[in-house]
Amino acid sequence: MKGSKFSEFMQEALNLQKNFMVAVFLLNGFLFAQSVVVDTANPSCNRFFGFGAEWDSYSYGSYEVTDSDFALIRKRVEYMGLPVARIMMLLKYGYNNNGVFDYETADMYRLYRHLDVCQALGSTVLLADWGVEQGWTVPPGSDIVSTDDTLYASVIGNYLDHLINVRGYTCIRYFILVNEPNYEVGSFSRWAAGVSNVKNALVTRGLQDKVLLAGSDMSNNVAWHTQAVELNILGAYDFHRYASGADILSGSLETYVGNLWTYAKTHDSAAAGKLLIVGEAGLSDGASTGQNSNIETFDYGVIMADYAVQCASAGSGAVSAWMLDDNSFMDFTWGMWCNKTLGFRLKQWFYPWALLCRNFKTGSKIYKLNTGRSDLRGIAAHHTDSAQGTSSWTFCIVNRLFSTQTLTIQVPGHGHASLSQYLYSPSSAITDSNGFPVATSILDENIGTGVSIACPGNSVLFLTGQEGTGALDISAANSKALFLFQNTPNPFNPATTIRYSIPIHSFVTLKVYDLRGAVIRTLFKGAVNKGIHTFSWDGTDRSGMASGSGIYIIRLESNGRALTTKALKVE
């Protein structure tokens, strides 16, 4: 064989080998399909209270969070729904010794402001008194210095009576004595005596059925959990867990949580009617008391969604992330948005955690999705409203692989559902002007026979048929045909939203052209599920520079067809 022919032959062989390897990659990733049947006979949690967060008022005074500032915070909390809120209480807020408590202090009014929101939303509040033995939690010269002091329990009973019976904060359903007592108190016997004292104080005031004791609130000490269960006094079992990235990725977190719940159910005959609560949820990698170096990253959102899915799969009835808001503690940066000094800027992980809070409703049954892969996890929530006669489903899929995974989810015995799809991925986390998640598509599917979805690598995908999910105001019937909607707003400045519908799973290209036919920006190029999809154009060109005012052509191409619409940018 002559040299030139041999070179051509070798090049062809290399091309064939390359194409074969690409095909193998696709078969292993994008084309991987797993049928998942929801086992409705075996819920992992029969009475889910919800996902939530730690929301403390401690440093709101130091940051000078005004009522106007608080209106923005309230708007975000209301969007989330915040089914569960763990809130700090301190004797420092109003205790004046000799059992006297001043309920009219600035600190107490800042606490009331939080509780007002929770009461209006119907949130379940876990009120945690952070203790008296570390000094900073009590006023100088306090006459209460020990957790087992009966005066401490009496003051707690009095302020709970005031909050619940006088001010009407019936949202306070659980009380926690001392934050992480294995560290803050150290002695289990002294803490247990304090719990017993508080129990008596609640009974004396007739509060024992209005607010239940939760504990042990331990962190990194399983022995405290087991001993707390054996006290036979707690109405719920809660703990803190800052898990490593490796433990979350491997699924070890689910095993850890499951073991705690198994112990409770084995040693407490009434445990099935109680809650297992993750009181503080977070990532230990990069963590210090006040900061986590990963908190601003996209990956933190994926990791925390994975954390949430594993806890719910293991039977937890409530998961509270640490934490909601950086204004809660001076110079802390664990929150979902920055403090007032930094302009209340939302962080990326707000997107998935807000959707978890908003769409996994209180009263839902939770089902673990068995995908057949340890790096592809998910849960389903079934929520029924007997008053309205409605039944709805919410699904969360977390893909820890780097390749797209396809699933067909089937719910036997159920029919059609209009499901809004939200996607948190490196290339898609669409939000509105408030920073709140926007659905990328609407799927009209029969979940009884199965709904097929493609979940990109390193992403979190939500499907929800719950009412009030912020679904696109577009008829699901429009998803039956290829259609390009008029962008909104139009005219626009600086950004506009583009929506289109695809009748089948297809490869699409969405581009913006100027009137000369030059490509200004490629907004999307790739495969999408059937349904209605949303993309936002920020008005910039391919180099990231702002495009000038004028008329632009938006062009959608799919399956040999092309549709266009005109968009007008104004200065």
Image (cartoon, rainbow, N blue to C red):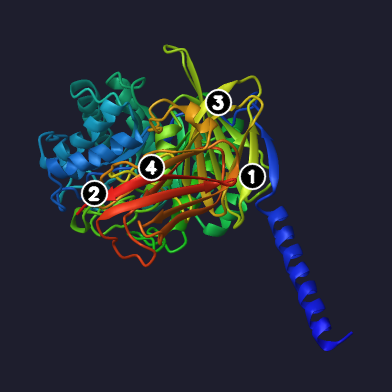
CA–CA distance in space, label 3 to label 4: 35 Å
CA neighbours of label 1 inside 10 A, class few (<14), some (14 to 19), many (20+): some
Tell me the number on the disc at residue 437. 4
The disc, 3 or 4, on the residue closer to the chain's N-terminal end is 3
CA neighbours of label 2 inside 10 A, class few (<14), some (14 to 19), many (20+): some
Q: Is residue 199 visible?
A: yes
Residue 12 location, x and y as percent? 78, 73
- Of residue 292 and residue 432, the one placed in the foreground of this image is 432
Instruction: Please tell me whether mark 3 or mark 4 is closer to you in this view.
Output: 4
Residue 206 location, x and y as percent? 30, 18
Residue 179 location, x and y as percent? 35, 46
- Give the residue type that dot 4 points to: Pro
Marks counted in the figure total 4
Q: SS class of the residue under badge 4?
A: loop
Tell me the number on the disc at residue 272. 3
Q: SS class of the residue under badge 2?
A: loop
Instruction: Please tell me whether mark 2 or mark 4 is closer to you in this view.
Output: 4
Instruction: Please tell me whether mark 3 or mark 1 is closer to you in this view.
Output: 1
| Quadrant where the N terminus is found in the figure | bottom right
User: Residue at horizontal 77%, vertical 69%?
Assistant: 17
Q: As drawn, which residue projects farthest toward the bottom?
A: 3
Residue assigned mark 1:
406
Residue assigned mark 2:
137
Task: Verify CB contact (< 8 Å) between mark 3 and mark 1.
Answer: no
- Of residue 565 and residue 545, the one placed in the foreground of this image is 565
CA neighbours of label 3 inside 10 A, class few (<14), some (14 to 19), many (20+): some
